Amino acid sequence: MNEMFLLKMGEIVLKGLNRAAFEGKLHSNLSRRLKPYGKFKIRLLQSLVYVEPENDECDLDGAWEACGKVFGIISRSRSRGCEKSLDAIFAACCDYLGDDISMAKSFKVESKRADKRFPMTSIQISQEIGGRLAEAYPEVEVDVHNPDYTVYVEIREEKAFVHGPAEPGAGGLPVGVGGKTALLLSGGIDSPVAGYMMAKRGVELECIHFFSYPYTSERAREKVLDLASIMSRYCGRTTVHVVGFTKIQEAIRDNCPEEYFTLIMRRMMMRISEALAKKLGCMSLTTGESLGQVASQTMQAMMVTNAVCTLPVFRPVIGMDKEEIIVLARKIDTMETSILPYEDCCTVFTPRHPKTRPVLSEIEKAEAKLDIEALVAEAVENTEPVHIHGRR
Ligand code: ATP
Ligand code: MG
């Protein structure tokens, strides 16, 4: 039925010399995301991406939803392509948008003429099509200032397109243009949101998950893989590097003062994550920490956990309230999975009175009995990579 998607590129169009690389990424990300929904022709022209089904077997609704989660697209419309003549445009408006027009209280037509060879100005096109539609739908008022519904007509090089109001796209930059980060992914609410925010800025994710079998169950591990899979609808393909953490937690329990358990554990996580990050070509670490949320997320605590890293540590939800983080978790569909009640290794051996104002020299003393280098090397060595291919 000649329906296709027009996707408007966002910030990419401002990228000057890097633009070709950005567009290449957007193209390949879209192709990969649309693959499960059939064969589509994807073309980038000026500031638009044209997504056209190649046959009737394509699942347009599925593809439309998938397009809404691809970063680099600022807005999108489902549209009908037609011949570049007033008769064909009018017929397409009635056939494709007629139901929406007739349900509106008022409407207007807005036209854009990208093909300057077309013999009418955009104002003339709007007037002509608007006039014909007003006759065809006499019960709907014309209101050019504050219309209930807007009909868009675009005259492009090869075709004309008609569509209704655009829907928002995912925004951001295409995943892959901004390097890679190692996301410390727990089963909680915050770290998936942190990953989403990095991916939105064009960053590819390698996820790292620490688990402490048998203190944490197989189901807790599955939950994290599920979260990564849900995240992949926005963030693209990823791998969860599963790190066995039991031996380290037991070593901490047996050799370190209790009030420092959590901080020493977090320093171990950061050391292992940094080693893995470097191995995987990541230029930063990312966590879901939010300032003051729990004892290990005070500024002093972050200072001592950060002290073991040389890579930058990004914390995209640092200034957000829990409620704000939850809004995003719902939007990206991770919330329901995040709140499943499986334990995280952070809740194993939690101190009764954790230090909220730790001093670095004291922590260093408290962990002195651990053979840190060997523990880190062993954990990195035994890491299991689980590839997440996404789901529909
Ligand atoms: P989240 O909701 O992301 O679990 P949180 O509020 O529960 O965060 P913590 O449990 O203190 O806070 O963890 C802080 C951050 O440390 C997490 O956001 C995550 O980035 C990282 N982290 C915690 N536990 C793990 C784990 N088991 N594996 C990987 N990263 C973890
Ligand atoms: Mg947690």
Image: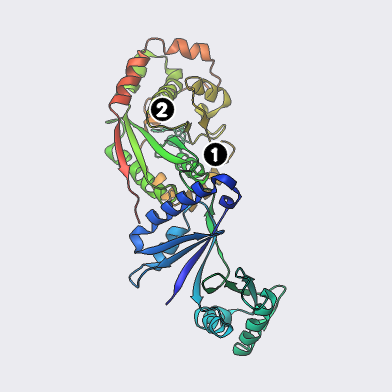
The spot of residue 333 in percent (x, y) is 44, 52
Task: Give above or below for 306 relative to 23.
Answer: above
**Is residue 328 or residue 178 the one in the foreground?**
178
Q: How many numbered tags mark residues here?
A: 2
- Comparing 258 with 142, the one in front is 142
Residue beneath the point at 42% across and 40% down: 205
> Which three-letter amino acid code belongs to the residue tagged 2?
Lys
Viewer-proximal residue among 378 and 227? 378
In the rendered structure, the answer to whether residue 275 lies left or right of residue 360 reads left
Q: Mark 1 points at which residue?
A: 317
Residue 81 pos. (x, y %): 49, 74
Quadrant of the snapshot with the C terminus: bottom left
Q: Is residue 37 visible?
A: yes
Residue where numbered disc 2 is placed: 278
Amino acid on which disc 1 is placed? Val
Q: Does the residue labelled 1 lie within 8 Å of ligand 1?
A: no
Ligand 2 image position (quadrant)? top left
